[in-house]
Amino acid sequence: MIPPVLIFFLSFLCHAAIAGRTCPKPEELPFAVVVPLKSSYAPGEEIVYTCQPGYVSRGGIRRFICPLTGLWPINTLKCLPRVCPFAGILENGAVRYTTFEYPNTISFTCNRGFSLKGANSAKCTEEGKWSPDLPVCTPITCPPPPTPKFAKLSVYKPLAGNNSLYGGKAVFECLPQHAMFGNGTITCTEHGNWTELPECKEVKCPFPSRPENGFVNYPAKQVLYYQDKATYGCHDTYTLDGPEEVECNKFGNWSAQPSCKASCKLSVKRATVIYEGERVNIQDKFKNGMLHGQKISFFCKNKEKKCSYTEDAQCIDGTIEIPKCFKEHSALAFWKTDASDVKPC
């Protein structure tokens, strides 16, 4: 029989050994908290794992009691992020994302011609919902364009009620006697406004001056305005240098200043020349002289090579220079060979 004193002593030693086995600080789990959290726990103390906001528990035990062994049981608890619902397709736009899990963010953009109505991004919240609400892409429109002073709207086809959609155009015309400065076609921009309006200004031109040896006709008005026209002509034996009709331009000037140039009298009586690609007799084609601007080519001899070549001459306001290499033969010198009959070099 064991003495009572010995039994008491052994019981005391066992209790002391068990009482000394405390549990250490519990294992940290991603996205989880422990209550209560201490550096050590006595046998019998309880702890509870709770997932952080935005996360939900999957598998494993959430409550643990410190055992007499002082060793916490293996914890298989996992805290996984909440998943927000599929954001859907943004009509006339695009959704950019990596995942739909908390706390990720998705972003929104609209196609060209549409504007974002709402926030340009949304976040998956702790409750598994998108915040703020998903936006929509609405068409960009411009109000009817204002009409510049002294102008009228000639082309405008609204497609959104009385408004114009992005990229729509409007065309202006200036009233008579007014010139346009700037682009007459404006465009509805991505900002919902129109490109810069043109300006219409009244333009006057001075009366055109009569050219020497010629005449000019223009409208019988006290004042000549933008796009008014004048016509020019020359007296006999003179040629108009410039356009026959000119117009008052937007800068208050005439589009050209024609003049009358004199014809040329030829000192050469007999010669074969090239005119507009054809061989002609100068005494027949130009018996009344050459008009200003006309050009002919004379034949000349290369005595060393015994061949012919041509040099040009042009009538310029009554003056023409005959090439020095050209030799005119008398009609009596029938035995001489004309340069035009010699083979070309």
Image (cartoon, grey):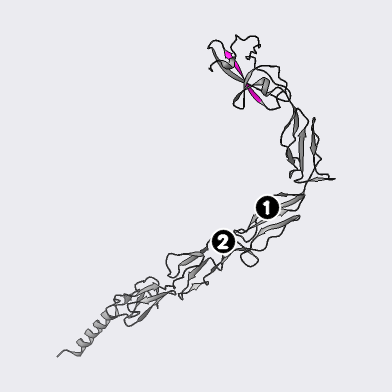
Q: Is residue 128 above or below residue 311?
A: below
- Location of residue 28 in the rendering, given as x and y in whole percent from the top left corner: 36, 71
How many numbered tags mark residues here? 2
Asked whether, in this view, residue 105 is left or right of residue 40, the answer is: right
- Location of residue 196 in the rendering, given as x and y in whole percent from the top left corner: 67, 54
Q: Amino acid at mark 2?
A: Gly
What is the number of the mark on residue 202? none
Magenta region, residue range: 295-301
Q: Is residue 151 above or below residue 279?
A: below
Residue in the picture at 71% in, 19% down: 266
Q: Which of the two discs, 1 and 2, sits closer to the camera?
A: 1
Displayed quadrant of residue 147: bottom right
- Location of residue 282 in the rendering, given as x and y in whole percent from the top left corner: 66, 21
Secondary element under disc 2, as helix, strand or loop, is loop
Identity of the residue furthest to the right in this view: 222
Is residue 299 one of those drawn in magenta? Answer: yes
- Cα–Cα gap, marks 1 and 2: 22 Å
Secondary element under disc 1, as helix, strand or loop, is loop
Q: Amino acid at mark 1?
A: Gly
Name the quarter where the N terminus is drawn.
bottom left
Q: Main secondary structure of the magenta part?
A: strand
331 or 3, nearer to the observer: 331
Within 10 angstroms of label 2, few (less than 14), some, or many (20 or more) residues?
some
Return the residue at label 2.
113
Asked if the residue at tag 2 contacts the one at tag 1, i.e. Cβ–Cβ closer than 8 Å, the answer is no
What is the number of the mark on residue 184? 1
Mark 1 or 2, nearer chain start: 2
